[in-house]
Image (cartoon, rainbow, N blue to C red):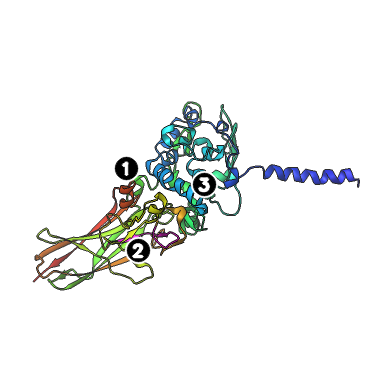
Amino acid sequence: MSAKAIFVMILVPVTILSGVYAQKAGDAAQGTLPYERFEQSDACASCHTDIAAQYEQAMMSQCFTHPWDEIEYFELALPHSNKEPKVSGIKAGCNGCHAPLAFLAGDIPPQRPSANTRANESVSCDVCHSMTGFVGDVPFNFNFTIVPGDTKQGTRLDGESPVHKIATNPFLHSAEFCGTCHNEKDPWGIWVKATHLEWKDGPYSKAGILCQDCHMPPAAGNSAPGMGVDRPDVRQHLFHGAHDTGKLTGSVEVRIHPDVRSSGPGEEVRLTATVVNAKAGHMIPSGSAEERVVWLHIEARDASGKTYHLKVDRKGFEGEELTIASASALAYQDIGDIKGLEGFPGLKRDGDVPEGDRIFRLPYLDPKGRMTVAQWNTASLGPDYRLAPLKAVNETYTWKLPETMAVGRVTITATVWYSRLVSSVAVFLKVPRDEYIPIKINAHETHIDVTR
């Protein structure tokens, strides 16, 4: 065989491999694709009217312009990245998922939403429909590969469009597609977002129920009215989750019962509340778990109308104090470090959650061991006391009835509440109230009768 023939044989596979690896992913993709390579979502909306209207109402279209995301990036993450080398990568990295067009264009840091740049498009239609796969074994930290252009990625074998080409790509119908942004490791190597990994380890994955089945459920319709095909299973672009009250309501179930049905003043009654993550295929709370608060509140009302707040019994596991609301405990001192506030004492760790209520949370701890809402500043984790999919947890309440309690029926109510952000942090950073107002997820009542 001639030397020329050998050279050709070697060159061909190298050329093929170079085509495969030409797509950069994760940090390496920063600055590789100018804004102009991507269609604006308004162009997509001209044909995909219903899908566009759903998308416009979802956080997917607002994850850069949303008030808390703006405050968190521009008032905490960005200044911290400029003063602490360990976290310097978040200046660009936050945008890999929250403003991918800006990240890919190298527009770092992007201007604030008020400047109305293309960063405001957040996760645009063309971003998702240009993704081709991901690099590595685990999807995380925006390690997707992306090829914008005339060909849009889709899932149908018979898809057609008069405007663009369609590539059938099963990646868009995989949980890994979502995992590229819904899994995140921070600079300390801590999984600070692991929604896809939680799903993968849980019962929904084993049952073949994907992220899209809950957050993009299929319904009869037409993805492009007037030119498309009527289908029985058009994926709805709802992306509804932690910012959708309708999705939250009923996601956690609660039931409560007493150990006796009648008792007298001065006697003890033991109540058991069973709490179940009945509907989510991942932990509750998930995603940015460091800032989200789910808690169980027990209140009793006697025959005279007097109310009593019952405090949860302790179980004795390590770190349990972080899962029981305190009126005095402080945390989030690293906000002072980031903002240069000398002697900053911190903020109320549990915000307005009533003292003694059980909190279902995963505490994120900064390098000094203090609770933080800065996920990029998380050096370790506290006890994972969240609600796992299709699993129940029992909380008990031992209550000594007051000697002066009125005779008659006592109604005991167990309520599960949710807040998207710790209220003390929200108030300090001037986050709009609708971001931290408590949302009632579920409630249940039981009763005992007080006799003499």
**Residue at image point 49% right, 46% down:** 94
Q: Name the outermost residue toward the bottom.
A: 267
Residue picked out by circle 2: 322
Residue 159, percent across and down?
56, 34
Circle 3 residues within 10 Å: few <14, some 14–19, many ≥20: many
Q: Which mark is residue 240?
A: none
Residue picked out by circle 3: 93
**Residue at image point 45% right, 57% down:** 378
Q: Which residues are magenta?
A: 357-371
Magenta stretch: helix, strand or loop mostly: loop
Residue picked out by circle 1: 432
Q: CA distance from mark 3 to mark 1?
A: 25 Å
* Amino acid residing under circle 2: Leu
Q: Name the outermost residue toward the front.
A: 342
Question: Taking 36 as reference, is 239 above or below it?
Answer: below
Q: Secondary structure at mark 1?
A: loop
* Amino acid residing under circle 3: Gly
Among the two numbered marks 1 and 2 on one chain, the one whose residue lies closer to the N terminus = 2
Q: How many marks?
A: 3
Q: Secondary structure at mark 3?
A: helix
Q: CA distance from mark 1 to mark 2?
A: 26 Å
Among the two numbered marks 3 and 1 on one chain, the one whose residue lies closer to the N terminus = 3
* Residue 73 in view, yes or no: yes
Q: Quadrant of residue 447?
A: bottom left
Seen from the viewer's position, the closer of residues 224 and 164 is 164
Q: Quadrant of residue 146?
A: top right
Q: Is residue 138 left or right of residue 430?
A: right
